[in-house]
Image (cartoon, rainbow, N blue to C red):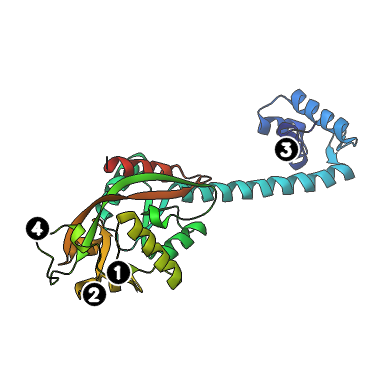
């Protein structure tokens, strides 16, 4: 049976045409090299070398197998180097994506610094994207991990997830609304027009279905459902008093707008997702640390 040692012995003899020199290269005795070559010739059924007291030379069979095994060795070296480079690049990089309006940069920075303590060479790339693009890039394997809400969870097999935190849902109301007082509660606005931002590439009927589902979960019976083309437009419509909007306290616009904010008493799960066949250990480590940051 051919094995790596016998092939290496054969290549050493073929390239030096000397059993003595081959033994030095292999850090073996000349007798051991001879035994490996003899066993190889027996297994193949061909004599590989002509041996005399004055010289060693390859037979035609030896020349054929030398071409084959030397090409295999060279190919092995190339594949080994390419594989090392691939895993070196993968282990030293972390490509994260998250919803464009999430205010979680400080949490990501904290988790990243912790992961980098074990791997100072780790390079981090963070990208903000609209929801559909975020899921699309993730499912196309262009992002190692994404952070998004349970409502927008990517659909597919072989995905792992971890809850980072529960984020309070709030009702946003224009400060000019006559009922928007400090004493008011979310119950005072349950019949107001309900504004919902469409998700990227989502049909109008899908957006309305998602809005109606959220209204049922919250016990809202709105006089009208208004679908805005994006989140910025939804906030603007709310500011103009066209209706009320449900958001989370991690939204940059919730945190920095002049809108009146009323607690709904419910939370939305913020999750991170990655592929279960992901080989980069930094991905799961980052997710675990991100969870710890919020607990």
The residue lying at 33 percent from left, 60 percent from top is: 215
Measure the C-alpha gap from mark 2 to mark 1. Answer: 8 Å
Report the front residue among 68 and 91: 91
Residue to which mark 2 is pinned: 242
Residue to which mark 1 is pinned: 195
Residue to which mark 4 is pinned: 183
Q: Is residue 108 above or below residue 26?
A: below
- Residue 141 in picture, x, y percent from top left: 51, 56
Residue to which mark 3 is pinned: 12
Measure the C-alpha gap from mark 3 to mark 4. Answer: 89 Å
The answer to whether the residue labelled 2 contacts the one labelled 1, judged by CB atoms less than 8 Å apart, is yes
The answer to whether the residue labelled 2 contacts the one labelled 3, judged by CB atoms less than 8 Å apart, is no
Measure the C-alpha gap from mark 2 to mark 3. Answer: 83 Å
The answer to whether the residue labelled 1 contacts the one labelled 4, judged by CB atoms less than 8 Å apart, is no
| Few, some or many residues within 10 Å of mark 2 (<14, 14–19, 20+) | some
- The answer to which of marks 2 and 3 sits earlier in the sequence is 3
Considering the image in quadrants, where does the C terminus appear?
A: top left
């Amino acid at each position: 049976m051919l094995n790596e040692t016998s092939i290496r012995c054969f290549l050493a003899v073929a390239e030096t045409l000397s059993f003595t020199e081959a033994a030095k290269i292999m850090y073996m005795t000349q007798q051991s090299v001879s035994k490996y070559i003899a066993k190889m010739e027996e297994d193949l059924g061909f004599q590989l070398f002509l041996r005399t007291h004055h010289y060693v030379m390859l037979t035609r069979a030896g020349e054929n197998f030398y071409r084959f095994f030397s090409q295999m060795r060279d190919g092995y070296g190339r594949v080994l180097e390419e594989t090392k480079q691939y895993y070196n690049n993968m282990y030293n990089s972390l490509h994260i994506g998250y919803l464009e309006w999430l205010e979680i940069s400080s949490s990501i920075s904290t988790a990243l610094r912790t992961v980098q303590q074990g791997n100072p060479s780790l390079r981090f790339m963070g990208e903000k994207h609209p929801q559909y693009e975020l899921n699309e890039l993730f499912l196309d394997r262009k992002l190692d991990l994404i952070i998004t809400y349970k409502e927008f969870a990517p659909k597919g097999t072989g995905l792992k997830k971890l809850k980072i935190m529960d984020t309070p849902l709030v009702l946003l109301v224009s400060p000019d609304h006559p009922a928007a007082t400090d004493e008011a509660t979310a119950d005072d606005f349950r019949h107001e027009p309900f504004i919902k931002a469409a998700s990227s590439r989502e049909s109008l009927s899908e957006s309305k279905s998602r809005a109606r589902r959220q209204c049922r979960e919250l016990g809202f019976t709105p006089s009208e459902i208004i679908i805005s083309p994006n989140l910025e437009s939804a906030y603007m419509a709310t500011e103009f008093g066209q209706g009320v909007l449900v958001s989370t306290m991690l939204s940059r616009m919730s945190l920095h707008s002049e809108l009146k904010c009323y607690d709904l008493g419910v939370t939305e799960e913020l999750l991170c997702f990655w592929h279960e066949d992901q080989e980069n250990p930094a991905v799961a480590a980052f997710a675990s640390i991100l969870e710890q940051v919020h607990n």
